């Protein structure tokens, strides 16, 4: 009965949560600049009696909101950063609100709002005496650049958690059972000697030559990298005029692999290649370690609790207008993208959603492969405390995150999924708080999975969050 009261508490705030998610959608802000979103979420928690800690991990837009006391302590993670150049109206045509502005192409306007909806419902349950313990909402900025939770983890923000819960917008609904790739994000800046490229080329030492030689060396490294490793780069500064030997050039690398030790090994090899490129060109090289993350450690015990709550809740209550909008958006997805996405789904999910534009029912698993071929800073939390996350349909089947279709849906019918996600979060937290045996089982699974490996931050001791001007996508 008590959990039904938690669901009812979320439902009673449904219109308020939808309005807040829409408000954040209308004020998109990129990583570490999310002042509007962070303030709005903090205000809601403060009004509900939460104790707020600001500036966690040295980031002004990172915060925590805590309610209750004693054990267990359940954390709910929330994100709210947008993506550059994804401004989009709520329409079925590619049409920016303001060309060049950011947009919520990953649905993070929904993400954090659902988290505070769950946290506030649990606070009411604590006040009623339905549950004992502590609930803490984590306002985590800059997920898109894999920064927020990594710096918060280094600051010890998650150390006292008994479990961490989170979710993510998607095109299907269900627990995420997969891992992700660990990653290092590093910028290599070569410094040489300028000279007139035609009249005195021998006097110059080209930093751009060093960048190109480094990239060539990394291409040969690919043959000897682990099968699921991913190494990609972009030249962020290649010099100025063609007739001047570039005295400085920078290349930015993401180095990914299925485990943290593999990434560290690959990074060492990439570092050696950079040093070799410097030797060949008689230039110096400086490394700027931007950020890094571990691989995701998914806790299936908590994932099972999430699945039970999804079964209790049933389908997401989309209406006919939502379905019509989703169908029109679905028509804009090209066939190759759709088929590639369907291939990523488990067979039962694929058979159920193929030919559909909007998936409303939950599934026990949302991925066919053991790894999500991307990276997330949720991973670092997952090595500190038992962590699980789920996905909720907020955009059409086959649509990808970081697209204009996802942005349009996140300001449209995706808003209807906010209360559903909040209920799953709140219900899962409730079950863990009133069932010590389930929380103990989650802890045992966590300890077995981590084994002798314990979390160490990938960040250098002197690393600071890369604020305005320091982040590039």
Image (cartoon, rainbow, N blue to C red):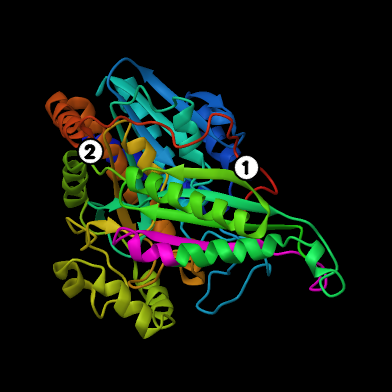
> In this image, 197 relative to 395: left or right?
right
Q: Nearer the viewer, mark 2 or mark 1?
A: 1
Which quadrant holds the C terminus? bottom right
Q: Residue at x 57, y 39 (%)?
A: 38
Residue 225 in magenta? yes
Query: Residue 385, image x and y in percent?
Result: 30, 31
Question: Magenta part of the protein: which range?
Answer: 220-244
Residue neighbourhood size for the residue with mark 1, other residues' Cα within 10 Å, grouped as few (<14), some (14–19), many (≥20): some
Q: Residue at x 39, y 61 (%)?
A: 230
Instruction: Name the foreground residue: 346 vs 448.
Output: 448
Residue bearing the label numbered 1: 466
Q: Is residue 26 visible?
A: no
Asked if the magenta segment contains residue 229, the reply would be yes
Residue 328 image offset from top left, x and y in percent: 42, 80
The residue closer to the viewer here, 273 or 263, is: 273
Residue highlighted by disc 2: 4
Among all residues in the image, which is located at the extreme front?
A: 202
* Vertical relation: 214 (above or below) 90: above
Residue 427 sits in quarter: top left
Of residues 185 and 367, which is closer to you in this image? 185
Disc on the earlier residue, 2 or 1: 2
Mark 2 and mark 1: Cα distance apart in space: 44 Å
**Helix, strand or loop status at disc 2:** helix
């Amino acid at each position: 009965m008590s959990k039904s009261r938690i669901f009812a508490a979320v439902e009673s705030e449904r219109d308020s949560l939808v309005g807040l998610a829409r408000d954040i959608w209308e004020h998109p802000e990129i990583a570490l600049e999310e002042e509007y979103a962070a303030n709005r979420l903090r205000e809601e928690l403060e009004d509900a009696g939460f104790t707020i800690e600001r500036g966690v991990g040295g980031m002004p837009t990172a915060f925590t909101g805590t309610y209750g006391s004693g054990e267990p302590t359940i954390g709910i993670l929330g994100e709210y950063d947008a993506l550059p150049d994804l401004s989009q109206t709520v329409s079925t045509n590619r049409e920016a609100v303001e060309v060049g502005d950011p947009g919520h192409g990953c649905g993070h306007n929904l993400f954090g709002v659902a988290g505070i909806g769950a946290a506030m419902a649990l606070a009411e349950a604590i006040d009623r005496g339905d549950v004992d313990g502590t609930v803490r909402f984590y306002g985590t900025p800059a997920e898109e650049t894999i920064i927020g939770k990594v710096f918060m983890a280094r600051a010890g923000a998650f150390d006292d958690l008994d479990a961490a819960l989170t979710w993510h917008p998607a095109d299907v609904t269900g627990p995420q059972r997969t891992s992700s790739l660990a990653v290092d994000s590093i910028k290599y800046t070569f410094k040489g000697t300028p000279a007139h490229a035609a009249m005195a080329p021998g006097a110059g030492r080209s930093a751009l030559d060093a960048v190109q030689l480094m990239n060539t060396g990394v291409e040969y490294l690919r043959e000897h990298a682990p099968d699921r490793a991913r190494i990609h780069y972009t030249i962020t500064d290649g010099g100025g005029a063609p007739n001047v030997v570039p005295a400085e050039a920078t290349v930015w690398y993401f180095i990914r692999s299925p485990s943290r030790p593999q990434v560290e090994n690959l990074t060492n090899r990439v570092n050696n290649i950079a040093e070799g490129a410097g030797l060949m060109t008689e230039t110096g090289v400086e490394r700027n370690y931007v950020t890094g993350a571990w691989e995701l450690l998914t806790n299936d015990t908590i994932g099972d609790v999430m699945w039970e709550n999804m079964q209790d809740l049933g389908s997401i209550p989309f209406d006919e207008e939502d379905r019509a909008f989703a169908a029109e958006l679905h028509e804009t997805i090209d066939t190759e993208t759709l088929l590639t996405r369907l291939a990523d789904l488990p067979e039962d999910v694929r058979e159920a959603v193929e030919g559909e534009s909007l998936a409303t029912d939950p599934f026990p698993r949302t991925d066919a492969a053991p790894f999500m071929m991307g990276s997330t800073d949720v991973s670092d939390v997952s090595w500190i405390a038992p962590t699980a996350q789920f996905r909720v349909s907020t955009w059409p089947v086959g649509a990808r995150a970081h697209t204009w279709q996802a942005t349009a849906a996140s300001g449209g019918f995706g808003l209807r999924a906010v209360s559903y996600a909040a209920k799953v979060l709140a219900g899962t937290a409730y079950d863990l708080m009133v069932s010590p045996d389930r929380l103990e089982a989650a802890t045992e699974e966590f300890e077995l999975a981590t084994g002798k490996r314990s979390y160490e931050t990938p960040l250098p001791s002197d690393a600071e969050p890369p604020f305005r001007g320091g982040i590039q996508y």
